[in-house]
């Protein structure tokens, strides 16, 4: 009887393999070559064994020697690509390179630039590394994200971030407006000293969107797209938020009067996320232009919302559940 993909994968290294690699050494043990990557994809695609999408037949399919990414049903002989429906489908780049890239993106807290990815993976040209990274970023985007705030209050603000230096003297930047919404969750834990339950706030899911301006119409569209109807929304008293109550939200504005400490106390989660976002953009990418800002916001959202679930991040990045394609280097930088 042919061996299951999981058995094949475990033959590759001595000793038991972890569910998800905790470090680079474990990653190399789990995925030493193209065959190991392919077995992993098969196991995720058919966790209970192969099931033909055409005839429903079960059982180990034929594998094609000349096309190792394709399997054939033994009953109806329909061919199925293991990478079908993922961003890996049709790629000429080695699966091992894709796996390494997905692992680095999923596990490096500070993120990784296309130039750094090219250096670490030995990719021949920058354009290939750029296209690969942007396809991974495209896989981060859900076409129908769940609205936040259905159970917890949401903090919202508009901040100016990104922007590359464009002459006009040192320090001059072109910042871009971004709406930031953070779900504020409450958790309880026992204080070991007093034995009492202590409540603390925790940043839940976030939503970020690059917007053209700070107007009520822009904020209203964002709220309807990203925040559950009737949710509690906390903001400052800016005019751009004045229509939220009319839209059915429980709007709780607070005058700031230019007081930063007041802002931090009323919107602590937004302040924290905004600070982290700006530090990440400046530290990893050294400023981001208007053309690419939303892609980087998507990456930050993806990382933040899955910061406790790196295995899920890795699998999502491989395109299991997403077929969105990223832009190519040529489409972004070459104009006809």
Image (tube, rainbow, N blue to C red):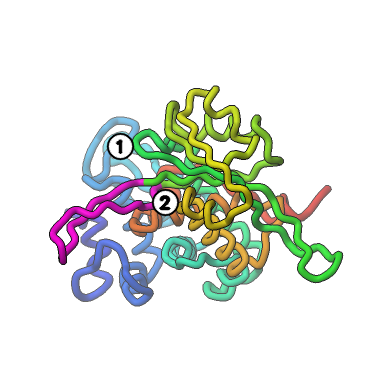
Helix, strand or loop at disc 1?
loop
User: 150 or 269, which is in the foreground?
Assistant: 269
Which residues fall within the magenta stretch?
185-204
Q: Is residue 252 above or below residue 130?
A: above
x%, y% of residue 37? Answer: 37, 61
User: 324 or 254, which is in the foreground?
Assistant: 254
x%, y% of residue 281? Answer: 60, 62
Q: Residue furthest right?
A: 168
**Residue 52 shows which numbered tag?**
1
Label 1 Cα neighbours within 10 Å, binned few <14 / some 14-19 / many ≥20: many
The residue at 44%/27% (across/down) is 229
Label 2 Cα neighbours within 10 Å, binned few <14 / some 14-19 / many ≥20: some
> Is there any visible trace of residue 270 in the rendered image?
yes
Q: Is residue 188 magenta?
A: yes
> Is there any visible trace of residue 136 in the rendered image?
no
Q: Distance of mark 2 from mark 1, alpha carbons?
A: 34 Å
Check disc 2 and report the residue beneath it. Answer: 305
Query: Based on the displayed image, in which of its 4 quarters is residue 213 positioned?
Result: top right
Say whether disc 2 or disc 1 marks the residue closer to the N-terminus.
1
x%, y% of residue 69? Answer: 41, 53
Q: Is residue 174 left or right of residue 238?
A: right
Report the number of discs: 2
């Amino acid at each position: 009887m042919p061996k299951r993909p999981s058995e094949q994968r475990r033959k590759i290294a001595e000793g038991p393999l972890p569910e998800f690699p905790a470090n680079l050494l474990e990653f190399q043990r789990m995925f030493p070559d193209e065959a190991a990557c392919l077995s992993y994809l098969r196991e995720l695609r058919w966790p209970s064994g192969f099931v033909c999408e055409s005839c429903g037949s079960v059982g180990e399919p034929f594998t094609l020697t000349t096309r190792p990414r394709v399997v054939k049903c033994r009953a109806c002989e329909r061919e199925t690509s293991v990478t079908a429906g993922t961003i890996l489908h049709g790629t000429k780049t080695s699966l091992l390179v894709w796996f390494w890239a997905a692992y680095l993106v999923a596990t490096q807290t500070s993120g990784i630039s296309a130039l750094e990815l090219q250096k670490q993976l030995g990719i021949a040209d920058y354009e290939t590394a750029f296209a690969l990274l942007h396809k991974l970023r495209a896989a981060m985007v859900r076409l129908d994200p769940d609205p936040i705030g259905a159970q917890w209050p949401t903090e919202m603000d508009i901040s100016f971030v990104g922007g590359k230096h464009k002459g006009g003297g040192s320090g001059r930047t072109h910042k871009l407006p971004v709406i930031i919404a953070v779900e504020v969750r409450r958790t309880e834990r026992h204080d070991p000293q007093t034995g009492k339950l202590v409540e603390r706030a925790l940043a839940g899911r976030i939503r970020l969107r690059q917007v053209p301006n700070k107007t009520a119409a822009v904020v209203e569209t964002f709220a309807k797209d990203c925040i559950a109807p009737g949710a509690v929304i906390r903001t400052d008293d800016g005019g751009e938020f004045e229509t939220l109550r009319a839209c059915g939200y429980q709007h709780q504005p607070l005058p700031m009067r230019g007081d930063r400490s007041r802002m931090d106390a009323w919107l602590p989660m937004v302040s924290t996320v905004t600070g982290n976002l700006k530090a990440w953009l400046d530290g990893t990418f050294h400023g981001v232009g208007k053309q690419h800002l939303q892609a980087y916001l998507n990456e930050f959202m993806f990382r933040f919302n899955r910061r406790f679930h790196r295995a899920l991040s890795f699998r999502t990045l491989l395109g299991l559940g997403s077929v969105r394609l990223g832009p190519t280097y040529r489409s972004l930088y070459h104009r006809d």
